[in-house]
Amino acid sequence: MNFVQNIPALSILLLMFCGIVCLVLPARWARHLADCAIALVCAASVVLWVAFLRGQEVFTYSMGEIGAPFGNELRAGMLEAAAATLFSAVTLLSILGGRAHLRADIGKKKVNLYYISVLFLLCSMLALVYTNDLFTAYVFVEINTITACGIVMSKEDGYTLAASMRYFIMSLIGSGLFLIAVSILYALTGHLLMSNIQEEVAALYASGQYRAPLQVSIALMGVGLSLKSALWPFSSWLPDAHSSASASSSAMLSGLVLKSFIFLLVKVFYRVVGVTIIPTHAILDLLLVFGILGMIMGSVNALFERDIKRMLAYSSIGQIGYIFCGIGLGTIAGVAAAMVQIAVHACTKAMLFCAAGGLMDASGGSKKFKDLEGAGRRDTYAGVAFIVGTLSMIGIPFFGGFITKLSLVTAAVEVGGWRNTLSILAIIVSTILTAIYYINVLAIIFRGAETGPTTAREKLREQWKKQMRLDTEYELAIVLFILLNLAIGLQSDRLMDVIRTGLAMFG
Amino acid sequence: MNGIAILIVIMLPILGGALLPLLDFDARKARMYYVMAIVLATSVLCLSLISGSEGTQFVLYHLTSTIDIAFRIDRFGSVFALLVSVLWPLSTLYAFEYMSHSHKRNRFFGFFTMSFGITLGVAFSGNLITMYLFYELLTLSTLPLITHDGSREAKVAGVKYLVYSIAGATAAFIGMIAVLTRGGSLEFNVIGLGSAVTEANRNFLDAAFLFMFFGFGVKAALFPLHGWLPTAGVAPTPVTALLHAVAVVKSGVFAIGRVVYYTYDAGYLAGSIVQKVALWFAAFTIVYGTVMAWKELHFKKRLAYSTVSNLSYILFAFLLATPQGLTAGLLHMIFHGLMKIALFFVAGAVMHQSGKTYVTELGGFAKAMPISFGVFTIASVALIGVPPLCGFLSKYAIAVAAVDEGSVSGYLGIAALLISAVFTSMYLLTIVVKAYFPGEGFDPASLKDVKEANWYMTLPLIALAVLMIVLGCLPGGLTQFIAGTLADAFPGL
Amino acid sequence: MTYFFADLPEYAAMILFGIGLSILMLAKNLVKKIIGLNIMDTSVFLFLAAKGYVEGTVAPIVTAEELGRIDSALYSNPVPAGLVLTGIVVSVSVTAVLLSLVVRLNEEFHTLDIDEIIHILRKRDREDL
Amino acid sequence: MTNVYTLLKITDKLTLQFGSDPTGRFFLCLVTIMWILVGIYAQKYKEHQKHNARFFTFYILTWVMLASLTMAANYLTMYLCFEFMTLLSMPLVLHNGTPESIAAAKKYLFYSIFGATLGLMGMFFVNTYGTTLAFTAGGVLDPAKIAGHETLILWVAFLSIAGFGAKAGLFPLHAWLPTAHPVAPAPASAVLSGCITKAGVLCIIRLVYQIYGVQLLRGTWVQMALIILALITVFMGSMMAFGEDLMKKRFAFSTVSQVSYVLLGVFTMNETALLGALLHAAYHSIIKDGLFLCAGTIIFWTHKEHVSEMKGLGRKMPVTFGSLAIFSLGLVGIPPFAGFLSKWYLASGSLSEGLPVLSWLAPAILLLSALLTAGYLFPICIHGFFPAEGEPEAEGKEGSALMLVPILILAAATVLIGIFASPLKDALQAAAATMF
């Protein structure tokens, strides 16, 4: 057995272990431990990814001695490795980018607890990515829920408590549905491992037995997971939760947590149900329609929002719609587009939330538009981040968003019938709306009274000094986020290759 | 080497403009010299590129396996670049004076200069996606110019502009991707989609063409999509003049020309139903624009509607998909640029000197501002199409192209052209008459505070008037230059 | 009829799941919501346990010497039991977190009604603006 | 065309060329003489108005363009001169600066431009279907190219000819004439009516005979339609004039009617009729200029604009009213005054053409119109000299020499050209012959 095959299990276990250790560490050490652990996981994931690029075959890794069909398995392929890399990298950057806020929002005493949540959150996301076992997936879904709520409510003001309560309840409904669906599937097939279930499902489909319960369980899984990933209209909890949390929490929640459930959903669709059966299932149409509605409604809501973090949260609802639109198209190209969007949105939205934190810092902590005027000049990193984010969201070539749009449109023009028309129209409409509200933000954060020529220069110098004192971690995070975005935009061929190979490894 | 030169021409004004707010000039003069130096350097470089480096191709970056960011200099793009690089320095000069009392001049000139590079980028794009890139950037870089004065009206106009433009660009993008999936490439190759056209693909490609036509048609102010242009008139006049009569709108027209002749080829379109649909829309817009201009009393809005109409002249010519159509369209693209920018400059000069914005308030202005209104008269007469001024030549060429093409849609266009000519005379000459002959009861004392604008404003005007006359009388060099596009677009010819 | 009785636990599980889900979604009182959640989870455990039990079999406890000589059809499926156990752990921990959250909310807003809490927040928001 | 001079070569096909041919020379002479006479008259009339520098500038510029038009050697040049003539003559109409005059000037402008635009459309098609744009007797259309497109070409011909007809007051584009003339200063009305309308006629002659060619048009529905339009205009103009009280407007309607006599001759498309047309163009110029100058004189001294106010005025202004009587006799066409000969040729040309119905209808309408002409012109003189019993004595006095001399010259011309018609007739016959 090749060493790299240990990486999935080890990274999950490492994160868990570190999380537990953090409990007894003082805040500062907890911080360093968390940073190192996540960085290590990130590096390990990269190693795994590289191994796949070098020709490593897809492999399964049994936890414990008991093998299939009873044992618990992890399974890794190209796409899983890439997703793990993305998740850990973005988590790391989000923590870096929102660090300044953590101190203010949580208080020194409890920061180590926050890092526990983060480590377990990442751990659960990686587990969702790697696991080959549906019940394990359920367990980690719940861990994910608890830790995600944990990082929201860590701020401990009225807003976050209420918001995390709503978030919790919605999530529990989702995971409850997921659980019952898993149980039904288990009852039907007698298996919990994805690959085994797929064989059974194919056999059941061929024989025509138990069609109804099978359909119901697929639908329940789809609904349950889309509930957790905030597909419109199940997204009412999201704006509150994402906007009230601390900057790095928002970044992770919007950028990653939602995506981990979508990743699981894709796995369910293509590894559990199977690529031959799923395109015939009505759940895809449902997801497409709601994805499209989400694209539009999210943007419409964002349009009227006067609070920068809520606006970003609504924007996430819209962007999640893109992902579901891609999945709902029911073609491999569509899923590939969804995967691209997962990557692009993860790094763009996380960056924007971090930058929003910076803007708030520069405006006395307020997140209302009226207080943010000129904030982009006061905090140029955030300003640049918003420019990049806007260009990416509109879909200017060189930026990640362009690749999303490219792949989604490519997928959309090739499917037939109403899906084609509807999705193309939705893309147009939502692009317009997105452009409007992001440019509106740009206009606000770069607005500012023109000062006289002499004072302007003095101010610039003063600003420069202030900038130097700013948090270098935050700046580093923003720069890396921008680079990540550009990297996706510039090296999209490789990304697409990875996704295509990865999806092929699913089958 | 020349590839790098293209990049320099495009990036110089973009970077120069972007740096302007950072440099933060104290003195008006210093900023003026800086901006002028950049603009002039770009123009000179651009002109020397056009004259010396035709046929250069340059791939900047392989964005994906099928999509490159590439530049090239061909005659079609050169014509547009020529127009832009001649008019930009004039407008910049004009803008210095016009904006002298405005606030946020750094921002204004920053974006104004950036737009120059971006427009050149559109001209020198080597494939559809590169063009799309610059096309989108153009929207974004001109948006702050429209909302410059910060009033509510300006914001509304900005949002409207943004909505229309982004919608159009996205639609065009979808068309492009459709072409990419069926045609396999986004390069401007003269064979067009010939090899990709099969019975099965035909409808698909037709739909893609319409997507691109209406998508780019937004900037070209095609009828149902023109709404942003008149409202964008709230922008400062140099912007309205240069961008909304030349750079922005022409980039839409230019893009459609690219699509017609370089992505699809003329053979694909000639006689097809999509060509007819497109021609009808263009013809209708010609009439609609002039009628609206005639009804409009706001000076700049009237000119904006006139632009709506005239842009469709160009579109109409391009859509004929014949060699004559191509050259006629390009000719009108250049000439309309000259004429319309002159008209807008006069409108701006009037606003700047007197604050008057409605055509009904212009009684007797010719006496107060003789140079401006002299040029206005020349430009009006040229736009109506009176020989030997330049507007006649291009209109004539378009009409003759339509006659030669010989289809019913072509004749429809001629009819539209003629109706438009009459309305053009009506909406422009009424202003001339009003300005020169205010009639009985006019009190000259009411205009005693109105002075002719200074040379920053009048020099561009005079230069434009001279160009209009000279090019109208001796278009030989220009037509030859334009005829050079035929070798590319019609290789068999 | 026998068919119905044979599947009785499954039907009961489904009905309970529905009840639990409804309470979780519709109840205003947070504690009731948590009760609903527990009902829902328990129903799933019932379902799993019912699936694991096979009529006429014994518990799957196998000594070392029996290994390799036995007929697996004689034993109940052990996996559901394991699942139920795991599920209970998860459910308990979620309930714990939720209850602590409820306590904090009660401290903050002096109510257990989620609608009221939202209402209070909205009002604060408006005062902010 | 002889002595062709190329001023500017815009493209290979589009050139600005000037040249002369008998028809052009005839119109040039006519226009120039009229311009000088009216110019002399205006030296006195200018006391009546402001902004004289402007007036004379445009007066001369209009002449320059009109003269250029007569010498234009190809379609493009003609179109250019036509447009500029419109633009430059417009300030003459609005010279008074009243709101009505400005509105009238705009009406004049837009009608003319609309007409010219239709004319321009002809050029588009001639460019493609013809061999050249230069005026060539017999037409320039290439039979090989138009084969199969006859309907199209005929429509184009019809529309472009009718377009230039706007300037000549051809129904249905005549409406600017009665609006523009009453508000313009008298000298402007005179040249507008006497000369500028003839520019429209000249353009139509060029199109019919030297661009489309008689072969193409003769006997087609286009010829019939144009003749019918001309006849409608002749009759309608006279009727309207008959019912009009405002003197200058009456004369304007008269112009509408009379110019269509000329057009009728042009459209009949044989040598006799064309001769009649050219003759009538000359006569009408002289007479109508004279009439407007008389009207101007009356207005200048008495400020009376309505015919009904002029009863008994002839006694105070005998020379003016005497001339008016001579002009009236000429216009009605009573031998030996000028108008007779032209109508004779028009009628005989029409009869010899042999078009169904129209051959005899045209002379009949000419006759009817002549009666109407008598009906609207003679009463002015009669009431002028012989007011009814009990009319109050009219106020007024005879004008100055500067005004009277041009009028008298014109009156003398009316008589003399009528009596000694042959030199003019011979010259015009030669001119007409070159058209075929």
Image (cartoon, coloured by chain):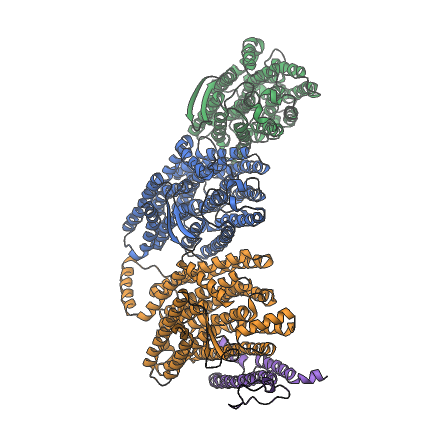
D216 shown above or below A165 = above
Instruction: Say left or right for A271 vs A387.
Output: right
Residue in the foreground of this view, choosing between B450 and B189: B189
How many marks overall? 0
Instruction: Say left or right for B244 vs A109.
Output: right
Q: Quadrant of residue B279?
A: top right
Q: Which chain is blue?
A: B
Residue occupying the far right of the picture: C1
Instruction: Say left or right for A173 vs A107.
Output: right
Q: Which chain is purple?
A: C
A354 shown above or below D310 = below
Q: Which chain is orange?
A: A
Instruction: Inspect this view and state whether residue B355 appears.
Output: no
Instruction: Say left or right for D67 vs A289.
Output: left
Residue in the foreground of this view, choosing between A270 and D194: A270
Q: Quadrant of residue D223?
A: top right
Task: Return the x and y of residue C124 as percentages of the image width and height.
Answer: 47, 76
Give the colour in which the image draws chain D: green
Residue in the foreground of this view, choosing between B360 and D223: D223
Instruction: Inspect this view and state whether residue A49 appears.
Output: yes
Task: Return the x and y of residue B347 as percentages of the image width and height.
Answer: 43, 44
Task: Return the x and y of residue D110 as percentages of the image width and height.
Answer: 54, 34
Residue in the foreground of this view, choosing between B478 and A481: A481
Task: Return the x and y of residue A149 as percentages of the image width and height.
Answer: 46, 78
Q: Quadrant of residue B154?
A: bottom left
D83 shown above or below A437 = above
